[in-house]
Image: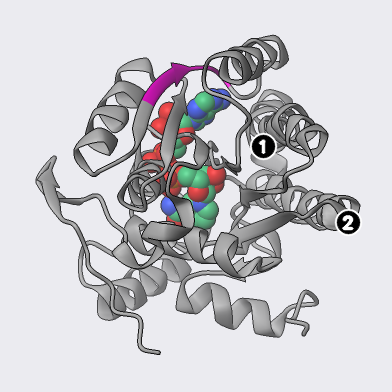
Amino acid sequence: AAWISEFVTAVENGRPQAAATGRYAERFAGQLVLVTGAASGIGRATALAFAVAGARVVAVDRDAEGAVRTAERARLNGAAAAWAETADVSDEQAMEKLAEKVATEYGVVDVLVNNAGIGLSGSFFDTTTDDWRKVLDVNLWGVIHGCRLFGRRMAERGQGGHIVNVASAAAYQPSKALPAYSTSKAAVLMLSECLRAELSGQDIGVSAVCPGFVHTNITSTARFTGVDADEEKRRQERTARLYGLRGYPPEKVADAILRAVVRDQAVVPVTPEARGAHLMSRFAPRA
Ligand code: NAD
């Protein structure tokens, strides 16, 4: 059957925001969905997509105001309920507090999206110890905390669920420009596969979603640039040619995240470049 996307578009910050498709409405009605890094970019689009699909949404971010804005918009988009929570995913105690509060006040999470992440570019020898720690703390430890705290409750409840970890095409595409970031994402990819194996008997799916270049704050402020200026220019030209100046929309990544849950996909390269790189990689698709 042809699935037709009905994009719900709201113009905010001068660009179309919100997303997702009515096609998943029944699938997520009333489910509790928690998205980290939900104040902006892919996380925000994902929270809003689940809202359109009728979920109860918990928008988590270290940016408190941003999380509130997402929750407000999620309500307008049709969420069964939406709450904003402030937490730094790299802070274990804060995450424990969050998990406890969510379990007590909202219930056991049905779908967890570990999306919060930070970018960092720079060659291997230019990357300081502090930079390595910062990136691994957020991008890897943030995911570990989420999986451990919310995944355990999911497993104990015994009614299944799904965890989506937002990795990146960088996880399987070596780059001299992003050694720390790529390493953190490769770790997230492997963690997801290991956890998928562990939870498979309990009807809990685990997906690693791997976008290529998507226009969000991370790419505009952290400057996800190649060390090589020519390479960076070619990448920008390619993206502009394919998607126009706004680039690949985060809403389409959100759509891939919902689909990963519905179809229980293990590794999901999202953008065309990410798919191409995936096919060429040692993580080539399997049946
Ligand atoms: P973004 O900067 O727009 O959004 C990231 C959000 O995460 C922000 O709201 C930020 O406040 C939040 N955040 C950052 N650190 C946090 C922490 N320690 N605790 C809680 N919240 C935190 O970027 P985005 O592009 O939407 O990124 C979302 C995810 O997608 C990241 O994991 C990123 O690595 C991944 N990704 C992005 C791209 C891309 O091209 N944009 C490509 C591949 C993967």
Along the horizontal axis of the image, is 101 left or right of 191?
left
Which of pointers 2 and 1 lies earlier in the amino acid sequence?
A: 1
Residue 266 in the image: x percent, y percent? 71, 66
- How many labels sit on residues? 2
Residue at 35% across / 77% down in the picture?
A: 238
Q: Which region of the structure is painted magenta?
A: 83-88
Kindly tell me whether residue 266 is visible in this rendering: yes
Asked whether residue 100 is drawn in magenta, I would say: no
Task: Indicate the amino acid at tag 2.
Answer: Gly
For residue 166, above or below residue 147: below
Residue 181 in the image: x percent, y percent? 64, 46
Q: Nearer the viewer, residue 119 or 63?
A: 63
Which residue is disc 1 drawn over?
127
Residue at 30% across / 63% down in the picture?
A: 22
Gap between marks 2 and 1, in whole Å? 41 Å
Magenta portion: prevailing SS class: strand
Q: Which mark is residue 201?
A: 2
For residue 2, above or below residue 234: below
For residue 73, above or below residue 195: above
Residue at 66% across / 58% down in the picture?
A: 208
Secondary element under disc 1, as helix, strand or loop, is loop
Kindly tell me whether residue 222 is visible in this rendering: no
Quadrant the C terminus occupies: bottom right
